[in-house]
Image: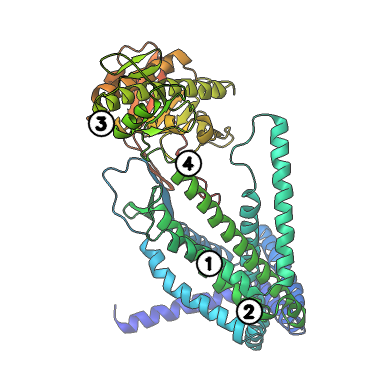
C-alpha cells in the first residue's frame, strides 16, 4: 500500500471517530461533561490557596463518581478503552518486581552485585534531592511558584497534580508511621494473654510518646534537621561497615525475570537506605518551602499550607523511620557479632580454687589452647589434678596428671566438651519441642529449626496450606539466643554446617523419642564423617516411624528466593517420599526488615 493509500485510510479512521463523537448519544455525555469542566475551572480560579484547591478536588472526585454511576447504567463511549489502557499500564508496571531472600547454602557462591536499576536510579535521585533541597533553601516559595505557573495554564491541571502529590505524602506518612509504631512491638509475642496485653500496652505507650516527640519536632525544629537525619544513618552505616568484619548474611535478589544474584546484607541495606533517603528528600524538600530553615511558623503564611504540612509530616516521619531502622540494624549487627554461632570460641575449662595443683593445670590448659572460665560455667569443662599416668575422664571431670602432653589434654578436653554440648543441646531442643507441642498443633504442622544462623532468632511453625486464604498464620517461638546457650548454638553450627543441613523441619505429630533418635543419627554421622560428606536419607535407615526427606532445591518463587538444603522429619504414614503440597513458609526464615534483620 502506497503513501496515498495510507493517507486515505487515516482520513477514513478520523472520519469514523468524528461520526462516533457527533452521535446524539455521545454528545449527550460529552457536552455536559465539557460544560461541567469549564464551570469547575472557572470556580477553581477563585481559590486563593490550596484550601480552595481541596474543595475543587472534592467536586472533581464527585464528578468522576457521577460519571462512573452513569457508566454502570449505560456505558459511556470511550471509557472502556480508557480503562483498558489503564489496566495495560498497571499490568506493565506490575511486571517490575524484585524477588528477594537469603542464601543459607552459600556454596557455590552466586554472582554478586546490587540491582543495576538501582545503580542507574541513584545519580538522578541524588541530583533531584540536591535540587529540591536547594529550592527549599534559596527559593522559599517553590510550591507557590509551581502553583502560580500551572494555574496560568489550567487550574484543574494543578489540582490533579496536587492530588498526586498529596497522595504520595499521605501514603508515605502512613507507611513510615506504621514502621515506627511496629518497631516498638516485641519480636516474639508472649505466650500468656496477660503477657500479650502488657507487651502491647508498653508498645502503645512508647509509640505514643515517640509520636508526640515527633509532632513537637515538626512544630519547633527547622526541616533541614529532618533532611540530615534522613541521609545520615545510611551514610554512617556504610562508613561503619566499610573496613569492618561482621556477621555475614548473603541476600539473594532477582529483578523481573533476570538472573539471581547476591549481595552482602550490610552493603545492600546501605544502598537501600541511600535510595530511600534521596527519594524522600527529592519529594519532601520541594514541598517544605521556607520551613527548610525557618521552621513551622512560616507554613500558614503561604498559599499552600496543606501541602507544606503534609511535606513536613512526610520528611519528619521518614527521618524517624530511617533513624529507628538503622539503629535496629546496628543493634542486630552487635548482637550478631557477639552471638554468631559460626564465630570461633576456644574451649573453656574450670579448675576448682581448692585444687592443690590449680596453677600448674591452668598453665597446661593455656599451653593446650584452652581458655579459663571465670566461674563454674555450665559450658566449661571441669578439670582437676589426677594421679593417673594419662589424661582420663572420670565422674564428669577431666583428670590431668602433672607433666601431661598438651596435645593429649586438648584431645580429651575437646572430646569431653563435645559430649557436654551434645547433651545440653538435646536437653534444650527437648524444651523447645515441648513448648511447640504444647501449642496444640499435630500432623501436617511443621516446626522449622535453624539454630546455626545468627539472623534467624526463632523457631517458626506453619500448618498445611498456610499460604492459602483463611489459613492460620505461621507462629514464631523464641528467641533462640535465650532458648539455646551460645556453646550449644556453636556446636549445632558445626554439626549442621559439616552435614550440609540448612533447615530442619520436624512434623509435630512425631514424638520426642522419635526426634531424639533422628538427632542421635545426625550427631553420630557427624562424629564418623565430620565435614567429609553430607548427611543422606540412607543414614536414617532403621528409624521406626520416621520418614526422612531431603529437599535440595531450596524455595524459589516470583517473590521469594531461599537457597537451602532442607531436612524433613515426617511421620512414616505421612505420604512416603513426597513432600507436603504446601512447602513451608520460607518467608518465615527471612529476618524482619524495618524490623529489618
- Judge the density around disc 3: few (<14), some (14-19), many (≥20) Cα neighbours within 10 Å: some
Quick check: 499 above or below 332?
Answer: above
Numbered-mark total: 4
Q: Is any atom of residue 445 visible in this view?
A: yes
Comparing marks 4 and 3, which lies closer to the viewer?
3
Q: CA distance from mark 4 to mark 2?
A: 43 Å
| Residue extending furthest toward the front | 356
Q: CA distance from mark 1 to mark 3?
A: 44 Å
Q: Residue 49, image x and y in percent?
A: 75, 81
**Which residue carries the number 4 mark?**
587
**Which residue carries the number 3 mark?**
531
Q: Are marks 3 and 2 in contact (CB under 8 Å)?
A: no
Q: Nearer the viewer, residue 509 or 83?
A: 509
Instruction: Please report whichever mark, 3 or 2, sits nearer to the chain's N-terminal start.
Output: 2
Instruction: Please report whichever mark, 1 or 3, sits nearer to the chain's N-terminal start.
Output: 1
Q: Are marks 4 and 1 in contact (CB under 8 Å)?
A: no
Q: Are marks 1 and 3 in contact (CB under 8 Å)?
A: no
Q: CA distance from mark 3 to mark 2?
A: 68 Å
Q: Residue 349, image x and y in percent?
A: 40, 28
Amino acid at each position: 500500500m502506497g503513501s496515498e493509500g495510507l493517507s486515505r485510510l487515516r482520513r477514513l479512521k478520523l472520519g469514523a471517530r468524528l461520526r462516533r463523537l457527533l452521535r446524539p448519544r455521545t454528545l449527550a455525555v460529552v457536552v455536559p461533561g465539557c460544560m461541567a469542566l469549564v464551570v469547575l475551572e472557572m470556580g477553581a480560579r477563585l481559590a486563593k490557596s490550596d484550601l480552595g484547591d481541596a474543595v475543587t478536588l472534592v467536586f472533581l472526585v464527585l464528578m468522576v463518581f457521577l460519571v462512573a454511576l452513569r457508566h454502570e447504567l449505560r456505558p459511556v463511549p470511550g471509557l472502556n478503552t480508557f480503562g483498558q489502557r489503564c489496566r495495560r499500564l498497571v499490568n506493565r508496571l506490575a511486571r517490575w518486581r524484585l524477588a528477594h531472600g537469603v542464601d543459607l547454602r552459600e556454596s557455590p557462591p552466586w554472582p554478586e552485585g546490587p540491582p543495576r536499576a538501582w545503580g542507574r536510579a541513584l545519580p538522578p535521585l541524588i541530583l533531584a534531592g540536591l535540587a529540591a533541597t536547594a529550592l527549599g533553601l534559596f527559593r522559599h516559595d517553590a510550591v507557590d511558584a509551581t502553583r502560580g505557573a500551572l494555574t496560568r495554564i489550567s487550574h484543574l491541571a494543578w489540582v490533579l497534580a496536587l492530588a498526586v502529590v498529596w497522595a504520595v505524602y499521605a501514603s508515605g506518612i502512613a507507611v513510615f508511621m506504621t514502621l515506627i509504631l511496629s518497631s516498638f512491638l516485641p519480636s516474639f509475642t508472649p505466650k500468656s494473654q496477660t503477657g500479650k496485653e502488657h507487651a502491647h500496652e508498653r508498645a502503645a505507650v512508647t509509640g505514643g510518646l515517640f509520636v508526640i516527640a515527633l509532632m513537637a519536632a515538626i512544630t519547633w525544629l527547622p526541616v533541614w534537621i529532618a533532611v540530615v537525619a534522613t541521609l545520615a544513618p545510611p551514610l554512617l552505616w556504610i562508613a561503619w561497615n566499610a573496613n569492618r568484619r561482621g556477621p555475614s548474611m548473603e541476600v539473594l535478589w532477582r529483578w523481573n525475570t533476570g538472573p539471581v544474584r547476591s549481595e552482602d546484607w550490610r552493603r545492600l541495606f546501605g544502598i537501600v537506605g541511600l535510595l530511600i533517603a534521596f527519594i524522600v528528600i527529592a519529594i519532601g524538600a520541594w514541598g517544605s518551602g521556607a520551613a527548610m530553615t525557618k521552621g513551622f511558623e512560616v507554613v500558614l503564611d503561604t498559599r499552600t499550607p496543606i501541602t507544606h504540612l503534609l511535606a513536613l509530616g512526610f520528611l519528619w516521619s521518614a527521618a524517624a523511620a530511617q533513624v529507628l531502622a538503622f539503629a535496629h540494624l546496628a543493634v542486630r549487627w552487635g548482637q550478631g557479632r557477639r552471638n554468631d554461632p559460626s564465630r570461633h570460641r576456644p574451649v573453656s575449662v574450670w579448675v576448682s580454687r581448692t585444687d592443690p595443683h590449680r596453677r600448674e593445670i591452668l598453665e597446661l590448659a593455656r599451653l593446650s589452647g584452652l581458655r579459663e572460665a571465670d566461674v563454674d560455667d555450665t559450658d566449661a569443662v571441669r578439670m582437676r589434678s589426677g594421679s593417673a599416668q594419662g589424661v582420663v575422664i572420670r565422674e564428669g571431670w577431666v583428670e590431668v596428671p602433672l607433666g601431661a602432653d598438651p596435645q593429649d589434654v586438648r584431645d580429651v578436653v575437646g572430646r569431653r566438651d563435645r559430649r557436654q554440648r551434645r547433651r545440653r543441646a538435646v536437653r534444650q531442643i527437648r524444651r523447645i519441642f515441648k513448648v511447640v507441642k504444647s501449642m496444640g498443633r499435630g500432623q501436617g504442622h511443621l516446626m522449622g529449626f535453624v539454630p546455626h544462623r545468627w539472623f534467624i532468632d526463632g523457631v517458626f511453625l506453619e500448618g498445611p496450606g498456610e499460604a492459602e486464604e483463611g489459613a492460620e498464620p505461621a507462629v514464631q517461638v523464641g528467641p533462640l539466643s535465650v532458648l539455646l546457650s551460645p556453646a550449644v548454638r556453636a556446636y549445632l553450627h558445626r554439626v549442621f554446617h559439616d552435614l550440609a543441613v540448612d533447615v530442619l523441619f520436624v512434623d509435630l505429630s512425631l514424638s520426642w523419642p522419635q526426634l531424639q533418635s533422628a538427632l542421635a543419627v545426625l550427631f553420630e554421622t557427624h562424629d564418623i564423617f565430620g565435614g567429609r560428606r553430607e548427611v543422606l536419607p540412607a543414614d536414617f535407615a532403621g528409624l521406626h516411624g520416621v520418614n526422612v526427606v531431603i529437599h535440595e532445591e531450596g524455595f524459589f518463587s516470583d517473590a521469594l528466593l531461599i537457597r537451602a538444603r532442607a531436612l524433613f522429619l515426617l511421620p512414616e504414614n505421612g505420604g512416603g517420599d513426597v513432600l507436603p503440597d504446601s512447602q513451608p513458609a520460607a518467608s518465615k526464615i527471612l529476618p524482619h526488615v524495618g524490623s529489618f534483620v
